[in-house]
Amino acid sequence: EPPADFICPITTELMSDPVMAADGHSYERSAIERWLATKSTSPMTGEALVHSFLAPNHMVRRQIREWEEASTC
């Protein structure tokens, strides 16, 4: 089982392109983009997001890749 931090809270699947939203949570890019197309709130808290900028979460992406490599051994 992957660590919970590697799972998108919207899709409940392992993220391949994690991004961080204004709420500080990481999401799969395509899932949060679909969410933000119709909403301006956090999927996690329901609070209004101060902006809709999505920052690539390189650290989580690297950790996921390392976990995947280790789990295939």
Image (cartoon, rainbow, N blue to C red):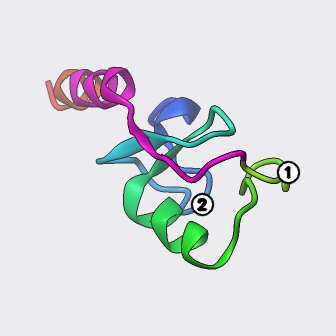
Amino acid type of the residue that numbered disc 1 sits on in the rendered structure: Glu
Label 1 packing within 10 angstroms: few (<14), some (14-19), many (20+): few
Callout 1: SS: loop
* x 51%, y 29%: residue: 3
Q: Label 2's element?
A: loop
Please identify the quadrant where the C terminus is shown.
top left
**Which amino acid is tagged 2?**
Ile
Q: Is 4 rendered above or below residue 27?
A: above
Confirm whether the magenta stretch covers residue 64: yes
Q: Nearer the viewer, residue 31 or 4?
A: 31
Q: Residue furthest front?
A: 51
User: Residue 64 location in percent, x, y?
Assistant: 32, 30
Residue 56, relative to residue 35: is it above or below? above
Tag on residue 19? none
**Where is residue 55 shown, x and y percent of the image?**
41, 37
**x, y percentage for residue 12?**
55, 57
Left or right: 20, with 49 as reference point:
left
Residue position for label 1: 47
Is residue 35 found inside the magenta-colored segment of the image? Answer: no
44 and 15: which one is in front? 44
Instruction: Residue at 71%, 64% (x, y): give it.
Output: 40
Range of magenta residues: 50-66
Residue denoted by label 2: 10
Nearest to the eye among marks 1 and 2: give it: 1
How much space separates mark 1 and mark 2, taking CA atoms?
A: 15 Å
Q: Position of residue 62 (x, y in %)?
A: 26, 23
